[in-house]
Amino acid sequence: QVQLVESGGGLVQAGGSLRLSCAASGSMFRMGWYRQAPGKQRELVATITRGGTTNYADPVKGRFTIAGDNAKNTVYLQMNSLEPEDTAIYYCHTVSRMGFDYWGQGTQVTVSS
């Protein structure tokens, strides 16, 4: 069973920055972040493969940056120019080398206007 430990959420004013971290207990094929705002479905934010290939949702392109540290099995999400619309619970997601996926417990990000 893979364990995911998330950190870095919080409250920030619009235009501010936050960095999320997610550490996995083993080596993963792909790691990333999804988010779910109240009353909305969970949606993709960004992903990164072990080889460094990244993918971003359109609303966060140019503002968020995802990065991975393979040695630490950790993924980071640097969020800049945050907007109130970014308010959500952010979930770490991983896909193992065997193709199984795992979710973190979620961390709250709140952006005030």
Image: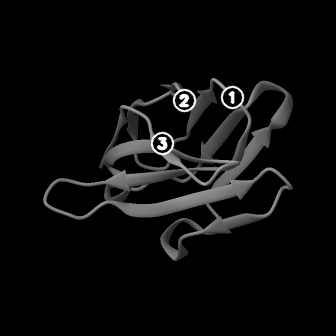
| Separation of marks 2 and 3 at Cα, in angstroms | 7 Å
In the displayed orientation, state which residue is furthest to the front. Answer: 98
User: Looking at the image, is mark 2 or mark 3 earlier in the sequence?
Assistant: 2
Front residue of this view, candidates 26 and 88: 26
State left or right for residue 12 relative to residue 97.
left
Residue in view at x 82 percent, y 36 percent: 70
Q: Quadrant of residue 19?
A: top right
Classify mark 3: helix, strand or loop: strand
Is disc 1 placed on a helix, strand or loop?
A: loop
Residue 109: x %, y % from top left? 37, 39
1 and 2 marks in contact (CB < 8 Å): yes
Residue 44: give x, y in percent of width and height. 46, 63
Question: In the displayed structure, does residue 93 sit left or right of residue 38?
Answer: right
For label 3, count other residues whose C-alpha is less than 10 Å away and answer few (under 14), some (14-19) or many (20+): some
Residue drawn where x is 49% and y is 49% of the image: 15
Q: Which label belongs to residue 26? A: 1
Q: Residue furthest bottom?
A: 58
Residue positioned most to the left: 39
Residue 68 image point, x, y percent = 76, 42
Task: Give whichever of discs 1 and 2 has the lower sequence position.
Answer: 2
Residue 71 or 81: which is nearer the viewer? Answer: 71
**Could you tell which of marks 3 and 1 lies nearer the N-terminus?**
1
Q: Are marks 2 and 3 in contact (CB under 8 Å)?
A: yes
For the residues marked 3 and 1, what is the alpha-carbon distance in whole angstroms? 12 Å
The residue where tag 2 is placed is 2
Amino acid carrying mark 3 in the image: Tyr
Question: Which amino acid type is shown beneath numbered disc 1?
Answer: Gly
Tell me the quarter of the picture where residue 105 sits. Answer: top left
Instruction: State the residue in front, 35 or 94.
Output: 94
Coloring scheme used: one colour
Q: Is residue 53 above or below residue 21?
A: below
Q: Which label sits on residue 102?
A: 3
